[in-house]
Image (tube, rainbow, N blue to C red):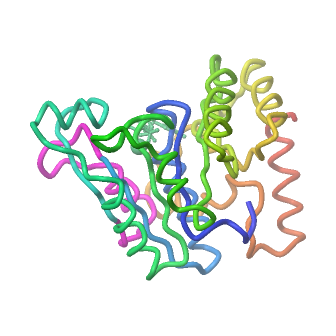
Amino acid sequence: MNDRLAPIILITGTDTDVGKTITTAALATALAATGRTVAVDKPVQTGVRGAEQGDVDEIVRLTGIRAVGEGIRLRAAMAPLAAAAHQQHTLPVLEEHLARVESLSAHHDHVLVEGAGGLLVRLTASGQTIADLAGALGPAADLLVVTRAGLGTLNHTELTLEALAHRGLRARGLVIGDWPAMPGPVEVGNHAVLQMMGTPLLGRIPHGASDLPGPEFRRRASTWFRALPAEPPEARGRERERYAASTGC
Ligand SMILES: Nc1ncnc2c1ncn2[C@@H]1O[C@H](COP(=O)(O)OP(=O)(O)OP(=O)(O)O)[C@@H](O)[C@H]1O
Ligand SMILES: [Mg+2]
């Protein structure tokens, strides 16, 4: 990661439940620690009833960041289009998501936008996805892909990168959303292959990160990424060494 991350950072994943929320929280914290102002947006939140906690609430708890947006909140724990149909609701159009994200962007150095599920999940009634949001935002946005560490991740990651390439898009980086405390041969092997995919592996979030109290999460989040712009070069070097030593790669 470096100081050329775009003002808008779209966080997608190889699937649902891969750790997009925790990655969004960690990256928001890491960027805020460099002195930038950060906002977070979730265009479509499903699986929450009434005042139940959604992903942005979890991000507020972990990061302390208060500038958050949410496009639509749906009760059913289903994909956005299905959840909307279940409630006889219509999903917001892409322009509505764009307007909300751009409005947050006008007042913050970075806006982190967490998708729903994986890359090609439909976020609008007409079938647009977070890839379309990336296309509409152009160079104002970077896209990160959160991946799993275990079996199956290599295929899912390759498919996601290929789907992006097919649309003329490129991910800025990969992040492993849930890295075990004691990685076995599968995770270590996958880590090595993920590093060969031509998209930088920017970091990994340690298992258990989402259970940390906010202050502890904020103390540690920057160390889960390979490098941060505001760190002095010698600290960055030490962090890289620690990062490499802990994976055995
Ligand atoms: N690093 C981690 N340590 C511990 N638990 C984790 C970690 N990453 C993810 N989890 C757990 O896995 C589950 C899914 O993670 P998370 O909600 O971040 O996924 P997601 O990709 O944001 O899913 P969604 O598509 O629903 O937004 C959560 O219960 C979360 O607490
Ligand atoms: Mg999430």
Relative horizontal placement of residue 18, taking residue 87 as reference (left or right): right
Q: Residue at x 51, y 37 (%)?
A: 119
Q: Residue at x 67, y 35 (%)?
A: 161
Report if residue 53 lies within the magenta region.
yes
Q: Of 162 and 167, which appears nearest the observer?
A: 167
Quarter-of-image position of residue 70 = bottom left
Quadrant including the C terminus: top right
Quadrant including the N terminus: bottom right
Report if residue 46 lies within the magenta region.
yes
Relative horizontal placement of residue 241, taking residue 204 as reference (left or right): right
Q: Of 73 and 207, which appears nearest the observer?
A: 73
Write down the region rendered in magenta: 45-68
Q: Of 228 and 181, which appears nearest the observer?
A: 228
Q: Quadrant of ligand 2?
A: top left
Q: Residue at x 40, y 41 (%)?
A: 116
Residue 25 is situated, as x and y percent measured from the top left of the image, at: 49, 56
| Vertical position of residue 103 compared to residue 157: above or below | below
Quarter-of-image position of residue 247 = top right
Residue 63 is situated, as x and y percent measured from the top left of the image, at: 45, 64
| Vertical position of residue 88 compared to residue 26: above or below | above
